[in-house]
Image (spheres, grey):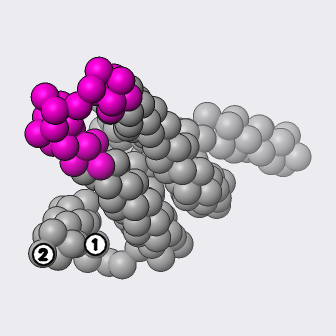
């Protein structure tokens, strides 16, 4: 009898050690984009971009005004005044180019800084769900060439709940929201 129990226990241990591994998948970028914190980051970025655009536009207007003045009066100016005005126009143009380059880099850095905690939060959420569900792999469907959804658990619904993403919110509704905001700002 002991021998039968020992064999049964060995067979049970062997069977459980050969259990099918569990796989899951998520749409990582969707989760990041739909997080409520991403809305705040987008709002901050929009405000920064608007401020940068206003500053850039003011610089361009200054250049255009001075250029119009130069064209209107250049024929009546002495060589030294004309050269001084040309130098001034060149300096303004250089400032515009330098501003454009530096503000682009700063805006990109700001976006990375704002999004980093969101990426981290989504990653931690997916990690937590994967560990709780006993999954050995979680694939991002955006970077996998093929996956069979019938053999992989979709963690997006659970992750959406944990991350506080409203139920009906999709990338399409987000796009519509962003377009509506852009139209409202244009008016």
Residue 42 occupies quadrant: bottom left
- Judge from the rendering whether residue 176 lies leftward or rightward of residue 123; answer left or right: left
- Judge from the rendering whether residue 76 lies leftward or rightward of residue 10; answer left or right: left
Q: Which residue is mark 1?
A: 169
Please report the residue visible at 43 percent of the width from the left and 49 percent of the height from the top: 28
Mark in front: 2 vs 1: 2
Q: Which residues are magenta?
A: 62-85
Badge 1 crowding class, 10 Å Cα cut-off, few under 14, some 14 to 19, many 20 or more, is few
Residue 94 to residue 125: above or below: above
Residue 36 to residue 13: above or below: below
Residue 15 at x, y percent in the picture: 63, 39
Residue 175 occupies quadrant: bottom left
Please report the residue visible at 20 percent of the width from the left and 36 percent of the height from the top: 70
89 and 107: which is toward the camera: 89
Please report the residue visible at 40 percent of the width from the left and 61 percent of the height from the top: 51
Q: Which residue is mark 2?
A: 187
Please report the residue visible at 13 percent of the width from the left and 28 percent of the height from the top: 75
- Look at the image and tell me whether residue 151 can be seen: no
- Look at the image and tell me whether residue 79 can be seen: yes
Badge 2 crowding class, 10 Å Cα cut-off, few under 14, some 14 to 19, many 20 or more, is few
CA distance separating discs 2 and 1: 26 Å
92 and 53: which is toward the camera: 92
Residue 79 at x, y percent in the picture: 29, 21
Residue 176 at x, y percent in the picture: 16, 67
- Secondary structure that dominates the magenta span: helix
Residue 97 to residue 53: above or below: above
């Amino acid at each position: 009898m002991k021998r039968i129990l020992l064999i049964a226990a060995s067979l049970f241990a062997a069977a459980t050690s050969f259990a099918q591994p569990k796989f899951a998948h998520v749409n990582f970028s969707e989760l990041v984009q739909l997080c409520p914190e991403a809305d705040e980051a987008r709002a901050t970025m929009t405000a920064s971009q608007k401020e940068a655009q206003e500053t850039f536009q003011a610089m361009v207007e200054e250049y255009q005004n001075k250029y119009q003045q130069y064209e209107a009066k250049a024929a009546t100016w002495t060589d030294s005044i004309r050269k001084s005005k040309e130098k001034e126009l060149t300096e303004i143009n250089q400032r515009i180019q330098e501003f454009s380059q530096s503000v682009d880099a700063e805006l990109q850095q700001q976006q990375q800084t704002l999004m980093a905690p969101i990426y981290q939060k989504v990653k931690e959420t997916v990690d937590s769900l994967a560990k709780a569900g006993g999954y050995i792999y979680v694939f991002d469907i955006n970077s996998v060439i093929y996956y069979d959804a019938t053999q992989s658990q979709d963690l997006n619904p659970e992750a959406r709940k944990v991350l506080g993403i409203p139920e009906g919110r999709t990338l399409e509704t987000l796009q519509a929201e962003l377009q509506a905001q852009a139209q409202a700002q244009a008016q």
